[in-house]
Amino acid sequence: MKLNSVAPKEGYTWIRQGIWLFKQNPLGFLMLVFMYVFAAQLAVIIPVVGVFAVLLLTPTLSVGFMTACRQAIQKERIRPTVYLIALQSGDLVRKRILQLGLIYAAFILLLSFMLSLIVDFELLLPLMTGDKAMTPEALRQIYLVLFFGALFYIPIAMLMWFSPILVAWADMPVAQALFSSWMALWTNKGAFFYYLAIWSVILIAIPLTIGMVFDTLSIGQAASFIIAPISIAGLTIMHCSFYATWKACFTEEVVSL
């Protein structure tokens, strides 16, 4: 497994490749994203255990989606069971992928604890339940959540970006996979910055702008009919583009699953 260094402009190329990949099987990829979103929403209903289960299985689902990308390129049918492929790949891979899930869950728990030291969640709770109007202090707390949440999540993302694939496809131990993932993102930080900046515009800036325009026109409720399809399509293409980042950053010896 060879780590490659790419130019910053490759960040844009990854998105174009993600669009191309999405076009190979749009219904299959949309099905996988809807399944994940549904499972995540269902998990919220089950306190603690449900959220932990989603976090634990996140590396497994990542391998499943990346396998679906490979199947789309090979013109194979994408099935819902592709999400389980890492768990069906032998005892060693299953053990390592679940260990990654435990590490990821621990990281998110630590992130939540650190945010709780900075942000007053008791002030935000009435806003989330719709029981209280927005205040300047509440808005400040929201900005704190967004800023520090993103700041604290960056090192987690660097460790977890490629590690599930390196465990499943490159047969790496967990520690080596985490280190290799970190090195891949650090080596190509210019390309990843460009890549994430573009996705931030597509998935955050554009929907917010559309929402503000519709609110100004007093038709804010209609905005969801435009924002929702854009967000779902963008989220699906972004997941497809993860495969492009993998192919660019690593020269792999393919291990059949």
Image: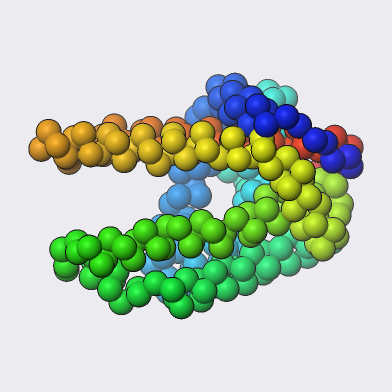
Above or below 136: residue 10: above
Q: Please identify the quadrant where the C terminus is shown.
A: top right
Q: Is residue 98 visible?
A: no
**Which is more toward the observer, 200 or 178?**
200
- The residue under the point 28% across, 73% down is 123
> Which one is nearer the viewer's eye here, 133 or 72?
133
Position of 36 compared to 72: left or right? Answer: left
Up-down: is 72 above or below 80? Answer: above
The residue lying furthest to the left in this view is 218
| Left or right relative to 103: residue 223 | left
**114 vs 52, nearest the viewer:** 114
Residue sitting at 14 percent across and 37 percent down? 216
User: Which percent across, then down, holds residue 54?
Assistant: 54, 62
Relative to 71, does residue 138 appear above or below in the rendering? below
Q: Quadrant of the N terminus?
A: top right
Q: Total label count? A: 0
- Snapshot quadrant of residue 251: top right
